């Protein structure tokens, strides 16, 4: 369902009120009256409109990085600045966590993909490399 953004036009004696409305395409009607000041000074903010649908990539895989990039691109610069300030404020106060939560401790053990020697991989055949990537075993 599409989200339509409106702003009460301050350049035309409006109050500057900004809001969004969810409407079905079949029920779309351009709004004219501001719900805040009741003046007929609304205009569509097309640059902020978003049509929601399913998120799919061509190969069907949706990654956390893809979703983060998509959400970041939808944020305004003021929203990004606010999020950045919130993050830095959390770090500045010593990183204390809410009650009942604790930090995950990093393991000193290296993951399987970092334990191999690069020369071992260079000496493998293409089939061995594919099997190593797929299974994590050098002899598989």
Image (cartoon, helix red, strand yellow):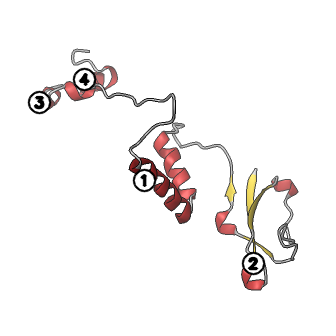
Query: Element type at marker 2?
Result: loop
Earlier in the chain: of badge 3 and badge 4, it is 4
Dividing the image into 4 quarters, which one contains the C terminus? top left
Query: Element type at marker 1?
Result: helix
Q: Count residues near mark 4 (Cα–Cα under 10 Å), then give few for <14, some for 14-19, many for 20+.
A: few
Earlier in the chain: of badge 2 and badge 1, it is 2
Judge left or right: residue 119 versus residue 6.
left
Between the C-alphas of marks 1 and 3, the distance is: 42 Å
Between the C-alphas of marks 4 and 1, the distance is: 30 Å
Query: Element type at marker 3?
Result: helix
- Answer yes or no: is residue 125 visible: no
Choose between 77 and 59: the one closer to the eye. 77
Reply above or below: 137 against 91: above
Between the C-alphas of marks 2 and 1, the distance is: 35 Å
Dividing the picture into quarters, in which one does residue 6 lie?
bottom right
Q: Residue at x 40, y 48 (%)?
A: 91
Reply above or below: 87 against 139: below
Q: Which residue is mark 3?
A: 119
Q: Which residue is mark 2?
A: 9
Q: Which mark is residue 109?
A: 4
Q: Which residue is mark 1?
A: 88
Earlier in the chain: of badge 4 and badge 1, it is 1
Residue 76 horizontal/vertical position (percent) = 56, 63
Foreground: disc 3 or disc 4: 4
């Amino acid at each position: 369902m599409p989200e339509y953004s409106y702003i009460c036009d301050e350049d035309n004696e409006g109050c500057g009120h900004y809001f969004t409305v969810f409407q079905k395409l079949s029920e779309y009607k351009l709004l004219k009256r501001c719900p805040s000041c009741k003046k007929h000074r609304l205009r569509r903010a097309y640059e902020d409109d978003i049509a929601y649908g399913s998120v799919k990539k061509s190969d069907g895989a949706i990654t956390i990085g893809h979703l983060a990039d998509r959400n970041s691109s939808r944020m305004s610069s003021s929203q990004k600045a606010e999020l950045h300030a919130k993050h830095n404020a959390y770090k500045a106060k010593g990183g204390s966590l809410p009650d009942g939560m604790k930090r995950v401790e990093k393991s000193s053990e290296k993951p399987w993909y970092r334990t191999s020697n690069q020369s071992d991989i260079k000496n493998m055949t293409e089939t061995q490399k594919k099997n190593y990537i797929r299974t994590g075993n050098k002899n598989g």
